[in-house]
Image (cartoon, rainbow, N blue to C red):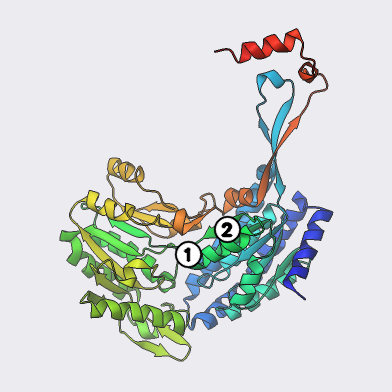
Amino acid sequence: MTLRTDFDRLKQAHLRGAFSYQQRIELLSRLDAAVRRNREAVVEACSRDFGRRARIETLAADVMVTLDEIKHARKNLRRWMRPQRRAINLTFKPARGEIRYTPLGVVGVVAPWNYPFQLAIIPLANAIAAGNRVMIKPSEFTPSVSALIETLIHEVFSADEVVVVQGDASVGAEFTRLPFDHLIFTGSTAVGRHVMAAAAANLTPVTLELGGKSPALIAADYPIAQAADRIAFGKCFNAGQTCVAPDYVLLPEAQLEAFITAFAESIARRYPNMAANPEYTGIINERQSSRLQAWLDEAKAAGVRTIACGPEHNVAEGLHLMPPTVLVNPPDNLTVMQQEIFGPLLPVLTYRTLEQALDFVLARDKPLAFYLFDRESARVDAVLGRICAGSVCINDVLVQFGQDDLPIGGVGASGMGHYHGRDGFLTFSKAMPVMHQARLNGMHLFNPPYGRIITRLVDFLTKP
């Protein structure tokens, strides 16, 4: 069976009738139950695919966040679906206006490998809440999770409600060329450009959740040990394989050594025996491990000071480990400063003035996330007035991603569009304006030949 056959079946099912409120709630409830039923299977599948993945990380980031999203949609869906009254121009009254949120049709979801369950199921939940049929293309780099997703979807949905398709990059390319009513892709900026180009042929609107280099900026008077501890959390969670992980740190010159010490101590507390610790997640595969090692080797060859917070070169069958590693003031021409790291390498750059640090951030592509560690509210407001990022978190990292009522979305090179919560519902809906003409109205005055009344009225309303 071809991808087009699957798509056409979903499209015809939608044209026969969109999901009602009760049907959407029923589908979301069944999805919730299936995720809860399969939570340990998700944990096991993620560990197989990563070689080793912390159970709590999978439960928190792939299961709990997904369940929260489904719960939030079920709780608020009736209110989201309610038509909104809109004003009608005085000259057209007593007509009335409203916005109705209508399903788009068939939504395509292309999921990545780093959070392979969550980033397939949350867009699905948003699209179902908006009343759509869905096709999902999971990542070929997480075969265990992808197979589990297909099994779970088959349990919950019929073939004319949701379809999962498996395959490599060639299947993914064919998938993005289908005439979806909306396509959401999560992945790299480079692949995102190809996805957008493929979607453009069908004028398919896209939501692109990409990545980029998300900075963490530490103010001069912020407690450096606290900042280092939270950044260590963000850089170690899923071994740094997170699109909103802090990619590099900007801190005052005088705080450099204190930061390195505090960062290393935080790592040692979290992972006293990193090589044998089941709570430290592995790099997904040989390709990604080799990439990170090559970037680190390039930095070392350029004379960059590096501090590995754990034993290096831990490779066992099916397991690739890289310790969190600080790179001090790497030059801008190195790959580690040009590309999204997506791993436990952490460049640390020093600045003399806050203005210098902001100029460094503003001279680069708009990041997917921006992290500011500062307790001076006036200064925080001033920085927020200059920064444009996909999301911002003050005095912490990562946690903004898991908030039901805060949208997730990039800007510029880090993506476009939003989802999560009501914003996901809106992304996968058409906000359709509807005007209800009154039985008694004055539109007959606009029929030629134009009389004295309409002439005087228009002249009056447009006079200088």
The reply, left or right, for residue 8 in relation to residue 107 is: right
Which residue is tagged 2?
68
* Disc 2 crowd, CA 10 A, few/some/many (<14, 14-19, 20+): some
Split into 4 quadrants, where in the image is the C terminus? top right
Q: Which residue, as the protein is rendered here, is positioned at the far left? A: 254
User: Residue 139, relative to residue 69: is it above or below?
Assistant: below
Mark 2: which amino acid? Answer: Asp
The answer to which quarter of the image holds residue 241 is bottom left
Q: Which label sits on residue 189? A: 1
Q: Position of residue 423 (x, y in %)?
A: 58, 49
- Residue at 15% across, 60% down: 254
- Image location of residue 17, percent across then percent down: 82, 53
The tag earlier along the polypeptide, 1 or 2, is: 2
Q: Name the foreground residue: 170 vs 249.
A: 170
What residue is at 28 percent from the left and 55 percent from the top?
Answer: 360
Query: What residue lies at 50% left-to-right and 75% top-to-bottom?
Result: 55
Q: Quadrant of residue 107?
A: bottom right
- Type of the residue with mark 1: Thr
Q: CA distance from mark 1 to mark 2?
A: 28 Å
Which is more foreground, mark 1 or mark 2? 1
Quadrant in which the N terminus appears: bottom right
- Viewed as shown, does residue 358 lie left or right of 194? left
**Percent coordinates x, y for residue 313 in the rendering:** 34, 87
Find the residue positioned furthest to the front. 449
Task: Report the residue at 33% width, 71% height from top.
Answer: 336
Where residue 44 appears, x then y in whole percent? Answer: 56, 80
> Could you say whether the residue bearing mark 1 is in a helix, strand or loop?
helix
Q: Quadrant of residue 458?
A: top right
Q: Residues within 10 Å of mark 1 (few under 14, many from 20)?
A: many
Q: How many marks?
A: 2
Above/below status of 282 relative to 65: below
Residue 188 visible, this angle: no
